[in-house]
Image (cartoon, helix red, strand yellow):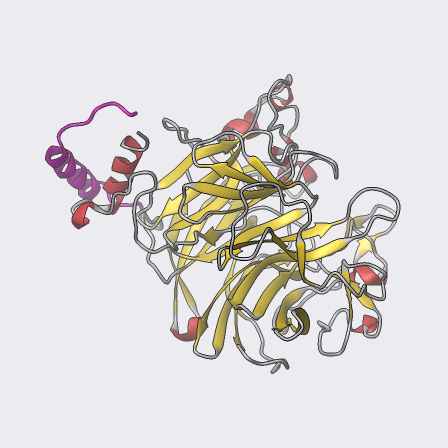
Amino acid sequence: MSAAVSPLNRTLLALAALGAATPAAAGSISSFTQGDLVIETVTNSTGLSNASALDTASPMTLQEFSLGSGGTSATSVGTFTLPQTASGANWAISGEYGSASEGFLQLSGNGHLLTIMGYGVNAATFNSAPLSTYGTAALGQTTSVSGGSYTVVPRVVAAIGANGSVDTSTAVLNFANTNNPRSVYTVDGSSFYVSGQGGSKTDPTQGVQLVNRGASTGTTINNQTDVRFVTGYNNTLYASRDYNPSGSGAQNYTGVVQLGSTSVLPTSAVTTPTHIVPAASPLSLGGNNGSINLTAATANGVNNSRIGSFVYLSPEEYFFASPTVLYVADSGQPKNGNANKAALGEGGLQKWVLDTSTGVWSLEYDLYQGLNLVNNNNVNLAGNTVTTAGVTGLFGLTGKVVGNQVELFATSYGLNELSPSYLYEITDTLDATTGAGEAFTTLFSAPTNVSIRGVSFAPAPGPVLGQGLLSLGGLVAAGARTLLARRRRRD
């Protein structure tokens, strides 16, 4: 427990005065407004474009936008930087600028928290440390396993309240070792489902784990490789993955899967996920479950030459608009820089619809107009390196249903880490099974050396995590509430 504080009334008066005397700096915010949109960004502080710059640690910044009518315009409200200094049980938290597969942002099941994962280290401290400290200059390649010769960097959950409170007390060891944490889902902040990748396809620290708030170890839910975004919908756990297991002849299962039983969030290992999209069978013309047969309706402009053949899937975040309509952001990223035509991918926003009579989901169409997608086989075969920049697909995704319309907000995925970074909006008709040719609107273009990662709606006001305490009748200013939350963080 934290040190004793003054009697409550005296504390409230002092904190309220403090909040009034120290307003947020220009451009910064200390709380969030429900209904606004929030993105997470990381920054290349070096300004350089070499490989070492991409490995650097960055503070994780949340930027809030108020939305115009229909979500077709956005105005920046301000920015909120997650803690760079440890305090009590709370850790500093940073992201890696060059890790394009991390930084998913989402709301808790009860809508009162934003959640995101990062690394338990101060960015400047990491960037200035000698190689002997962490064993690597790349934040995403640090160890999360104790007992070695290098400083351990836990993978940290950040749970952010509408009032600006931030809880980073859940610092997970033996998870996403020498690779990146990707996403985190919680019902109410008492425990967290975390997803991340390990250092190899057989690494026991990868997959999905369930971790109690404040704990440093978790329970493995699923240990399969290349899990990306994990979330809950209707009390059921789902994950996107690019599962390409090791071993000759091993099947590639790429898509969105269900972990555990319907309407029951799992608390123990799920060894056999249930395929949602695409179905486990039949296999595509590519002979695997990691690709789809391309049609004119599902082509995205750059992969049209593959109509009648197959293209690979690369699912990132997804959004259930209803129990029978699923939107999937596909990054369209090349498979290990492979320049063969199948690697063109299915970048864009896919709409999948469930046939309730058969239980099979079908891809109806791919939304891509306005994204200006580039052909992602633009690689130098000799050096296997990307030679052009541009957008190959989408990464983060959130949305809301208004009548029979679905307002969707997505973030771009670049051909490389130095590609331009964007926030988009598009509106689709919920019950449509044929695309209407609608196009994405660009709401925000990130400045040079800033990358946009996840996107979510802002949380609703609610209890401060770990206290069951509301805003004390509105008596305490937003900044002061944050200070009080930190002082009374844990029992």
Horizontal placement of 400 versus 100: left or right? left
Residue beneath the point at 71% across and 78% down = 297
Q: Is residue 45 above or below residue 67?
A: above
Q: In this view, does 338 lie above or below 2?
A: below
Residue beneath the point at 46% across and 47% down = 186
Q: Position of residue 333 (x, y in %)?
A: 71, 56
Q: Is residue 458 above or below residue 477?
A: below
Image quarter hosting the C terminus: top left
Image quarter hosting the N terminus: top left
The residue nearer to you, when weighing 36 against 350, is: 350
Residue beneath the point at 80% across and 66% down = 282
Horizontal placement of 231 versus 167: left or right? right
Magenta highlight on residue 20: yes
Quarter-wise, where is residue 18 in the image? top left
Residue 447 visible here:
no
Q: Is residue 275 above or below residue 466?
A: below
Q: What count of labels does the image hold?
A: 0
Residue 410 visible here:
yes
Residue beneath the point at 58% across and 79% down = 438
Specify start and end residues of the magenta stretch as a single range: 1-25
Q: Position of residue 13 (x, y in %)?
A: 12, 38
Q: Position of residue 456 (x, y in %)?
A: 46, 57
Quarter-wise, where is residue 136 in the image? top right
The residue nearer to you, when weighing 66 against 106, is: 106
Magenta highlight on residue 411: no
Q: Where is residue 191 in the image (x, y as percent from the top left)?
A: 45, 41
Horizontal placement of 473 versus 424: left or right? left
